[in-house]
Image (cartoon, rainbow, N blue to C red):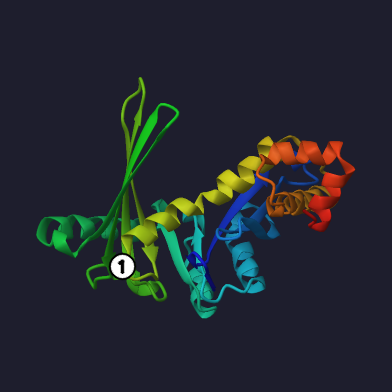
Amino acid sequence: MRTEQGQEQIAIDGKTLRHSFDGERHTALHSITAWSKSQGLVLSQLKSSGKKNENASVIDMLNLLNIKGALISADAMNTQKKIVDKIVAKKADYILCVKANHKKLRDEISAYFHKVKRENPEFIETYDEVDSGHGRIEERTYRQLRLSEWIKEAEQWSNIQTVIEVERTRHIKGKKVQQETLYYISSLTPDAKKVGNAIRSHWEVENKVHWVLDVTFKEDDSRIRTGDGAENVAIIRRFALNLARLHPQKNSMRGKLKQAGWSDGFRSALIFGQN
């Protein structure tokens, strides 16, 4: 799956609708969202039986989508061998975070980077970037290495080609410097800039979907909880989000929704795709 910007990226992430629980009768709605980086649209939403069962729902979603040729990104919770097997079987690439749920793999990747930095730093593909704003400066260094037999745990992951180390340093005005190091596995060949862009782009599903749903659509404040009501209305919200994003007018999401409420003509333009 290619776009004018290159390989399509599909970010997959889960979200719990906080106020949709109803005592012992209904647990809070947890759903999985697939987000298209190039289109800026929600591709799919699928109800999960709970946050602990999110992995099975991600596999169901991958079965529904045409992901051939795309790059799939997900958080550490969904860094699972069955999910990787499904992505590879459908001829797609992946970039997935590795945290404490795969501690041995994470520790081997960390040790491998330490070894190569000390002995053969020229083998490391590196990309640096700096962002600033709101009294904060964030520096990020992405390092990517081809897979080595030295990482024994990698043998269990389908089509793994490279491992990635990300160092983030945040300088916040009036506060201490914050530092963290994260590790990733990927089927991509070495291209640290592409990898860095993909890792950053993954969080668009949080910033451009989940945050907008909570702040603009007030999703987290919704107390709809009877039957399938919470799920049905969540689908409608995402449909409305897509319609508003597709409209060419350069305006904020909040502004578009207000204008749609005031103007029959603008509302029709959003719904029916008119300019």
Q: Nearer the viewer, residue 137 or 13?
A: 137
Q: Nearer the viewer, residue 54 or 137?
A: 137
In the rendered view, tell whether residue 125 sits above or below residue 87. Answer: above
Q: Is residue 250 left or right of residue 100?
A: right
Q: Quadrant of the N terminus?
A: bottom right
Q: Is residue 213 left or right of residue 123?
A: right
- Count residues near mark 1 (Cα–Cα under 10 Å), then give few for <14, some for 14-19, many for 20+: many
Q: Nearer the viewer, residue 186 or 71?
A: 71
Residue type, label 1: Pro
Q: Is residue 212 left or right of residue 69?
A: right
In this view, the residue farthest toward the front is 275
Q: Is residue 37 visible?
A: yes
Q: Which residue is found at the position 31% from the left and 67% from the top?
A: 190
Secondary structure of residue under mark 1: loop
In the rendered view, tell whether residue 99 sits above or below residue 220. Answer: below
Q: Nearer the viewer, residue 206 or 251?
A: 251
User: Where in the figure is residue 39, as x and y percent of width and height?
Assistant: 61, 60
Q: Is residue 218 visible?
A: no
Give residue 28's quadrant in the image.
top right
Give residue 52's quadrant in the image.
bottom right
Q: Which residue carries the number 1 mark?
A: 190
User: Where in the figure is residue 10, as x and y percent of width and height?
Assistant: 55, 62
Q: Which residue is found at the position 41% from the left and 26% from the top?
A: 135
User: Where in the figure is residue 37, as x and y percent of width and height?
Assistant: 55, 58
Q: Which residue is found at the position 51% from the left and 59% from the top?
A: 78
In this view, the residue farthest toward the top is 174
User: Where in the figure is residue 44, as x and y percent of width and height?
Assistant: 68, 61
In this view, the residue farthest toward the right is 264
Please give the count of numbered marks on the rendered protein.
Answer: 1
